[in-house]
Image (tube, coloured by chain):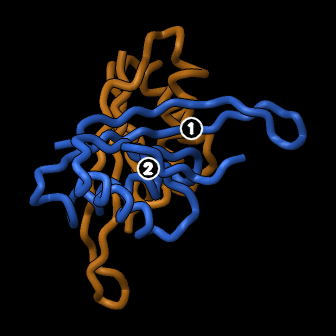
Chain colours: A blue, B orange
Amino acid sequence: MAEEKQDENVVFVGGKPFMNYVTAVVMQFTKGASEVVVKARGKFISRAVDVAEVATKRFLNDQGVTVKDIKIDSEEFENKEGKKVNVSTIEITLGK
Amino acid sequence: MAEEKQDENVVFVGGKPFMNYVTAVVMQFTKGASEVVVKARGKFISRAVDVAEVATKRFLNDQGVTVKDIKIDSEEFENKEGKKVNVSTIEITLGK
């Protein structure tokens, strides 16, 4: 499996230090993005919400960046034992 | 602090067994509710998303219940050391 990706306009939240993700979001807006999508799966969903809240309220408030949309969904995948399990996902769209 | 409340039309997700919350949501709709709000704070946010996904996709699909709205926010509170800390919150509105 790949690492967490930091694609253009997408920040995928995983187990790295919290402020890495906040900084990644803030940087995207500083570089001119009008929208950034914060994504996470499973237990990292809580962290994604924290990242979105801290980025918008503490760092991007004066730039007028707010939460524009939130989507939740589930993905099915096979675990090591070949059993199908579901994992929840979240996509939080931040924008001006 | 009070226990997790199971008010009319609100299911507050905490540390009890997962299916308790799913059952609580399903029961509200069975009893005639047209909307149920799944709420959680901090690390329980991921669980609240799981509850909403399992309730809608596995149990309430044939009743036409879907995710209508999702809000995230932060609350400030004082911890035991008297220090102000922020906690993220989520409110997932399910409805027909």
Image point (35%, 47%), residue name: B90
Between marks 1 and 2 in the image, the one whose residue lies nearer the viewer:
2
Image point (49%, 49%), residue name: A12
- Residue, far bottom: B81
**Mark on residue A11?**
2
On the same chain, marks 1 and 2? The answer is yes
* Residue at disc 1, secondary structure: strand
Left or right: B13, with A34 as reference point = right
Horizontal and vertical percent position of residue B37: 35, 35
Left or right: B16, with B12 as reference point = right
Residue that numbered label 1 is attached to: A88
Q: Nearer the viewer, residue B58 or B70?
A: B70
The amino acid sitting under disc 1 is Ser
Chain ID of residue with mark 2? A
Image point (36%, 14%), residue name: B96
Can residue B7 be seen in this snapshot?
no
Would you place residue B60 above or below residue B71 in this image?
above
Image point (27%, 44%), residue name: A94
The amino acid sitting under disc 2 is Val
